[in-house]
Image (tube, coloured by chain):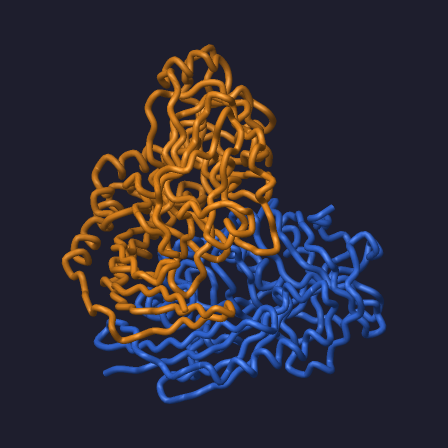
Amino acid sequence: MRWFEEEGTMSMVSLEHERMRRPCFASFSNRREEWDDSSCIVKSTSNGSRHRDERWGECAVGALGMLATRLRRPVALRFARIAGFRRTTDPLGDIRERRIDLFALTGRLTLAGGRFMSIGWSGKGDGLVRFGETSADELGAVASAVERAEPAVLGETPAILDYQPAALLVHEAIGHFAEASASPELRLDGRVGCLLAAEWMTAQDDPRLGEAADYVFDDEGIKSMGPTVLLRSGRLSAQLHSTASALRAGALSTASARSAQVAQPAIPRISNLTVGGGNSDLNEMIEHLADGLYIRQLSHGFSRGSYVEARLVLAERVRNGKRTGVFVSGGRVIERADLFLRACEATTTTRLNPNAMCGKYGQILYDVGTIAPAIRMTSLRLAA
Amino acid sequence: MSTARTVLLARTVDGLHVSYSATGIIERNGSLEFIEAPSPLSFGEIAIALWQRWADRIPQALYRLLVAEAGEVSDGGKSCLYQIARIGSLILPHDDDAIHFGPARPWIEIPGHLPLILGPSAVLALVDFALNGIEGLHRQEAWPFEDRFSLFDTDASPYPPQGLPPPHRDFPLTAGGPPFRKLPDYLSFAVKCRNDSWQRPIDALHHVSRRNLRVAYVGSLAQPSVPHLILDGLMAEVEPCLGQASFLTQATYCHGDGRMSLCSSPLIARCHVGGLLCAIAGLGGSVAAACVCDPIDGDIYGYAPPLALLCEAPIELEDLLA
C-alpha cells in the first residue's frame, strides 16, 4: 500500500463590495492510501497542526486594502495561502516529506463600462512581497490602457509577445503538449519528435529551479534528477511523466507527478517550464517588427489537443518600428501548438510569469512556473 | 460552540475499483479543523452494485462516462444516505426503469435539424457560464434574463456532499444581490461542501462567493413527442461571457417513442451565449438535479429544468473526433 498525506492550514482574506472579510483559517490533515488493486481511500485525520497564522492574516488584510485603494476601481479579491507539509511513500516504501507554502491572489477588477479584468497572481511563499506599490501601479496602468483600448482588428498580424503573453502561450503550447496523458486510455507518446518550435528555441522543465514550483521529490516520491529537456532543434524531445504514464510509454518518470491535494490522484504536470532567451532586446525587436502588435497581456489560456487559445487583454499598435500608444483589446489568440515555429527573435532576458496557476483534470495547482523571454512572431492569429 | 460534519462516500468509475473518502470537519470558534471520520468501506459494494445496474442498461461504449457513488453525510446531528449515478453530466434517475437506452450512435448517423433540448445539466452550465460572464462580486449589472430565469444561490444540493442540511439559506441572485452582512461565510461553505476540491485558491475562477445554483424558468411547454436531441451537459472551453463561446457536450438522441440513444462521441457546441438564452422557448417539467462537469473546477451540482430551444437557435454542433 502507498500513502500520501498532507497537513497544514489554509488562511484566507477577501475583499468584496469594498468591505473586508476577517481572516478565516482551516486546519487540515488528510491522508490518501492506495491499494495494489488501484482502489484508494482519502480520509481526514486529527493529527494536523491547528496553526492560525494571525500575523499573516493581519498583514494580508493591510496589503489587500492597500492594493484596492491604489487600484482606484471596484475590485473583488481573494488572497489565500496554504502552508504545511506533504509526505508520501516512494516506490520502495520510504517516506518523503516536503514543505508547502503557497499563495494565490485572484479576483476581478471592474473597469469603466462594466467590463472585467481578471487578476491572478500565485506562487511560492506568503505572497505579501507581491503587494508592493510597483505591482499595484503596473496593474492600474494595464487597467487604464484596457479602458481606453480600441477593439482589436482580427486576422493575422506580426506580433511581439511581451514576457507574460509569451510565458502564457509557451505554457499552453509547449508545456501542456509535453505532458504525458493523465488517462490510461489515451496515449500521447507519439508526440515525441513533433516539430513544435523554431530551431533556436530551447525549453526544459525543472522542479528544482526554485521558482514557482520547488520540489525534489514529486507527489509519488520520485526524485527529480534535474531538468527534463523538452525541445531539441525545435522538436519535442521528451514528455513529462508520472510513474504510470512512463510505464505505458516505456519511459522513465521525470518526477512530474503532481496533485492539487491528497484527495486527487497525482498526474503528469509541468513544474517550472523555462524557455531560453535569445539575443535581442525589446526595443530592437519593436524596431524589427515595423508594423504589428505588441501584445502586453493575455489571459484565460487553455489548450485542447493541438490547439491553444488565450484572450487578448491588451496590445499596443506598433507602426514603423515605434510604439504608438494606441491600445487594442478583445478577441482571442487561436493557434496550433506549433505556433512557435514562427518565433523569429527573443530577448536575452527572461521573466517568471506572475500567475503560476494551472488547472487540469479538475485540479488547480498554484505553483506551475513559466519563465520565458519576450518573443517576436512573424505572425499571430487573432479571432473573435 | 462547535458543529461536526462527516462525509463518507464510495465512488466507482469502472465497477471494479473503488475510491473511498471519509472526511470529518468541525467548526470551532470560527476556525475549521479536519477530524477523523468513520470508515466508508461499507459503501463500496453499494456503489459497485449501482454501477453494474446501470452498466446493464447502457451501451458499453459509454462505460467510460459512467460514475456511481454511494455514501452518507452527517451534519449537525442529521444524517442523509444517498446514491447517485451519472453518465458524464447526465444524472440518471433513481428509478432505472424510467429510461431505456438503445445502442450508442455516432454523430454522423443522427438525423440533422432535430428539435433541440438543453438537459438540466446543460441549462445549469449555460446559466452559470453567462452569470459568471456578467457578474462580479458587486453584481451592479442586472441579470438580463430576469423575465425568463429566476436564479438562487443556495446551500441545498441534489448531491448531499455539496449541500448543507435544511433549513436552507437561499438568496435570489438579482441585481444588487443580498446585503454584504448577510452573505454567508464562503470559506466555511467551501471547506464543508467542496469536500474533494476545496484546497485551492477559493473562488480562483468565477464562482465568486457563490454556493450552489438553482435555476428556475418562468413558463412551460410540452415535452416534444417527435424525435429530438438533448444536450446533456456543456463544458466551457473559454472564459465566461455573453458572446461567442465554445463548449464540449454530450448528446442523447430521443427517437420519439421512448427509446434513447446516446451519441458515442463528444461534440463541440459553438454558440452565442446571450442569443442561446434568448432562444429558449421553455419546456414542461420541474427543476431537476444537474451537474456542471468543469475540467478545472471539478463537478459542481445544482438544480435546473430541461429547456427547449427555438429551431433557429444560434448553436452549431460538430463531432469532436471527426
Q: Say if A37 sits above or below A120 in the image.
A: below
The blue chain is B
- Judging depth in this view, the residue of B147 and B263 nearest the camera is B263
- Judging depth in this view, the residue of A77 and A308 nearest the camera is A308
Left or right of residue A211: residue B149: right
Image quadrant for the N terminus of chain B? bottom left
- Residue at (31% x, 37% y) in the render: A140
Counting every numbered tag in the picture gives 0
- Judging depth in this view, the residue of A363 and A57 nearest the camera is A363
- Residue at (60% x, 48% y) in the render: A187
Q: Say if A92 sits above or below B216 in the image.
A: above
Task: Please say whether residue B304 is visible from this viewpoint.
Answer: no
Q: Quadrant of residue B201?
A: bottom left
Left or right of residue A328: residue A283: left
Q: Picture coordinates of residue B320 (x, y %)? A: 69, 48
Task: Please say whether residue A249 is visible from this viewpoint.
Answer: yes
Most extreme residue toward the left, as rendered? A55
Left or right of residue B156: residue A284: left
Q: Quadrant of residue A315?
A: top left
Q: Picture coordinates of residue A164 (x, y %)? A: 39, 33
Q: Say if A285 sits above or below A368 in the image.
A: above
The orange chain is A
Most extreme residue toward the front, as rendered? A92
Q: Picture coordinates of residue B250 (x, y %)? A: 68, 59
Q: Quadrant of residue A351?
A: top left
Q: Say if A373 sits above or below A182 in the image.
A: above
Q: Picture coordinates of residue B22 (x, y %)? A: 40, 77
